Amino acid sequence: MKRITPLLTLLTGAGAAAVLFAMSAQAAPRTVQPTAGATPSASATAPPDAPSPPPADPTGQPPAQPSEQRGRPGAPTTAPAAPAAPVTGNWTGRLDSGATIAVTATKGTAVAYVCDGRRLEIWLRGTATDGRLKLTGKKGATLTGTIGDGDVTGELVVGDKRWRFTAKAAATPAPVLYRATAQTRRTGVDGGWIMLPDGSQIGVLTRDGSPAPAPPLDPAFGTTIVDGSTVAAEPVAADPGTAE
């Protein structure tokens, strides 16, 4: 019995030492050793992504480049408007009232004369550009029209009265409209003459404020005789400033 007691004491001490060693191993922190072939985390070592190129145009065309003029001070944004095209020509015709009209245009300056061959006469002046007529006269008279292929159509307005008209282009470059010269008008005599395509003419001559049918005018000399006195006239196309 005495021999067994020391043996039990030795076994008890060895067991206690084993238990303490196991408890110490469990309490110590674990360390993880890197394994061969392991790679660092992508989020920690990967470089920042480069900007992706723009998607390719399915049509094969290169991408549009910004305009060189965009943002440049003073760069024009619209093309300048083309200048108005002046018109030259002669037309004669009638209003729906029966009066006769003549229009003559020289490089964009237009003159029109309307008369009935008895008492009525109206002079107008304005422009003939881009295929359009725009003229004005005394007492607020206005004439507007459109120049077509060989004719002019439009409207004459005087006060609250309106008349439509159509005029045909002259077949020759000969003047279709004459008026008493400025020197003649200073003597108190004024007159206008329209040369019609059939060779006839119509006009009104006013003396001291009294209108009457105009006597025939000789276009070769630009004169007529009134009470034994010579009255001089000239083509309006050569003197567009005579319109009033």
Image (cartoon, helix red, strand yellow):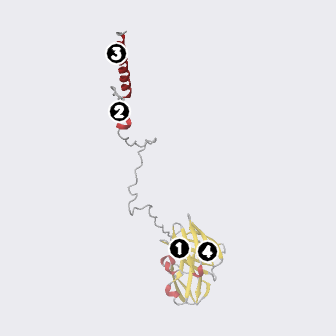
Are the residues flagged by discs 4 and 3 in contact, CB closer than 8 Å? Answer: no
**Residue 199 seen in this snapshot:** no
Mark 3 or mark 1, earlier in chain: 3
Estimate the spatial distance between the alpha carbons at disc 4 and disc 3, rounded to whole Å.
143 Å
Q: Which mark is residue 40?
A: 2
Labels 4, 3: front one: 3
Q: Is residue 76 above or below residue 114?
A: above
Looking at numbered disc 2 in the image, what kind of residue is underneath it? Pro
Mark 3 element type? helix
Q: Which mark is residue 10?
A: 3
Mark 1 element type? strand
Are the residues flagged by discs 3 and 2 in contact, CB closer than 8 Å? Answer: no
Looking at numbered disc 1 in the image, what kind of residue is underneath it? Thr
User: From the image, which quarter does the C terminus lie in?
Assistant: bottom right
Looking at numbered disc 3 in the image, what kind of residue is underneath it? Leu
Q: Position of residue 63 (x, y in %)?
A: 41, 46
Estimate the spatial distance between the alpha carbons at disc 3 and disc 1, rounded to whole Å.
146 Å
Q: Residue at x 56, y 83 (%)?
A: 191
Q: What residue is pinned by disc 1?
A: 104
